[in-house]
Image (cartoon, helix red, strand yellow):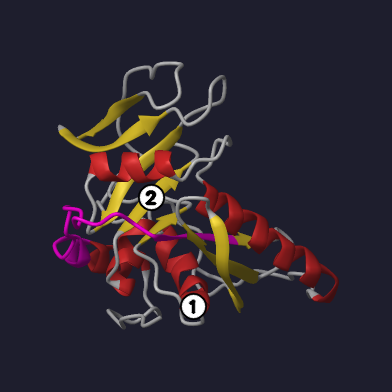
Amino acid sequence: MKCLNLHPWDLQYSEAMKVQQELKGKLILEAPNIDPKLVAGADVSYSKDSDTFYSSVVVLEMPYMSVLEEATAEGKVDFPYIPGLLSFREAPVLIKAFEKVKNVPDVIIFDGQGIAHPRGLGLASHMGLILDLPSIGCAKSKLVGDYDPVGSEVGKYTPIIFKGDVVGAVLRTKRNVAPVFVSPGHRMDILSAIEIVMKTCRGYKLPEPTRQAHLSVNRVRTSHRSTQSPYQGELFSW
């Protein structure tokens, strides 16, 4: 897959925020009129005692969610953990995995936020622009906004309101299990994002693409654990 080079990655905090503000204006929050055949999931994992990141992209085929392709990558952390700037920490290693993918998906679901983000550009939105593909953020926790309680039935949802705008939805994907937080990434709208997430769920809390990516990246991390070097000292002085 082709990844666009939208900006440098060696940035300071203020520079990264400026990039987010600039890229937000490039987002398209309308979904293409397609019935997705290939849906990808992407996830990142790392050990607390290591400065190595692992990423996985799994492409699944609708409607049975059969795995068609899996691509993984690893890389060193070169950006500190700063709330709201997660994509600058995780996107580089995700790009390495996406560049190996041969079957271009119709839509990608990320374990992270889309526009439900302080500056409207979470990981799913940022990566959606880099890949120039429809993308969805499906996170396990809230980053911004307020919402009313969501119904207990599978498929029920309630909007996430941030600064007066609807930026996503709290969606019940499994009964008696905490909901997920869905928001459009790029070339996507809220209702289409909800519909795609529900179509790709297979009895678990997480949609199958990100669930498979999570399993994949943890297998990779575990298999490399014995060769990881202990993390010593501080990488950053910010």
Using the image, tell me which numbered label, if any, was put on residue 101: 1
Classed neighbour count for the residue bearing mark 1: other residues with Cα under 10 Å, few (<14), some (14–19), many (≥20): some
The magenta-colored residue range is: 21-44
Classed neighbour count for the residue bearing mark 2: other residues with Cα under 10 Å, few (<14), some (14–19), many (≥20): many
Quarter of image, res 7: bottom left
- Left or right: 146 with respect to 142? left
Which structural element holds mark 2? strand
Task: Measuring from the top left, give residue 231's x and y in whole percent.
Answer: 73, 69
Assign the N terminus to one quadrant of the image.
Answer: bottom left
Q: Is residue 205 magenta?
A: no
- Left or right: 187 with respect to 215? left
Q: Does the magenta stretch include residue 40?
A: yes
Task: Measuring from the top left, give residue 84's x and y in whole percent.
Answer: 38, 53
Check the image and report above or below for 198 versus 125: above
Residue drawn at 58 percent across, 58 percent down = 213
Quarter of image, res 50: bottom right
